[in-house]
Amino acid sequence: MSKIKLGITFTCVLIIVIGVGFLLPRRWSSKKDVKSVVSQTVVDNSVGLVVQRDASLSSAPNSVDDEKAGQLWKFNQPLQTQQEFVISASYEQGASLKKLTSATKQSLRDAVLDNVNRQLPKQYPGYRQVSQQDITVNDIQATRVVFEYTSTQTRIKQQLLLLFKNSDTVVYIKAQARAGDYDDLNQHYFEQIFSTAKFQ
């Protein structure tokens, strides 16, 4: 297998495996009952990712499959909130990324983004990209991708933030919810995590 196939295959598998874990439950509620509470600092020792989150968010330990997929953490809506959502972080690191950039002769950002943009329409039924923007988050090079897709006849909106830590480490932060709830939840929960992301 050529270098380009090795790099792209690893990245594709990572995106697909992680994406499965981010699918929301099949029952949806349109009731809006969002409350702001105390912030909490979350520090991950694997790649040094630090974010601020709403302390009321619920979480669960990673499973073995989660860890194999590079998942750092996953948060869900507070117990008192009827709007369902998922916010999660994962990472990709090491030889696979170096093989990808070497084979494609692209920068890490360009190579990863090209691959992500090829895989998302395959992974998510009814995929439609809303926006894509190269940004800087706390002095970190990043790209924000917002898109919608269909899950069990429900329209879902997701924001994917790619943080390029260095030449061989990429962190993916994802937040998704029912499309009709997304803007409200983004204001109350998602943006706090996205805007405070940094590395130790």
Image: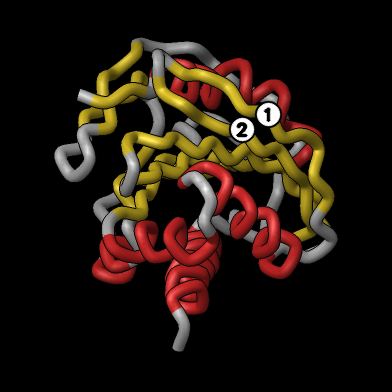
Q: Taking 164 as reference, is 21 above or below it? A: below
Q: Where residue 99 sits in the image (x, y, percent)?
A: 38, 65
Q: Residue at x 45, y 88 (%)?
A: 1
Residue 160 sits in quarter? top right
Compared across the picture, whether 46 is left or right of 40 comes to: left
Residue 138 seen by the camera: yes
Give neighbour class at mark 2: few <14, some 14-19, many 20+ (Cα, 10 Å). Answer: some
Secondary element type, mark 1: strand
Q: Taking 55 as reference, is 118 above or below it? A: below
For disc 1, the marked residue is: 133
Q: Where residue 73 sits in the image (x, y, percent)?
A: 32, 45
Residue 14 sits in quarter? bottom left
Q: Earlier in the sequence, mark 1 or mark 2?
A: 1
For disc 2, the marked residue is: 144
Gap in angstroms between the C-alphas marked 1 and 2:
5 Å
Compared across the picture, whether 128 is left or right of 83 comes to: right
Q: Taking 53 as reference, is 147 above or below it? A: below
Secondary element type, mark 2: strand
Considering every residue shown, the one lying at the far bottom of the view is 1
Q: Residue at x 65, y 64 (%)?
A: 119
Q: Residue at x 51, y 30 (%)?
A: 142
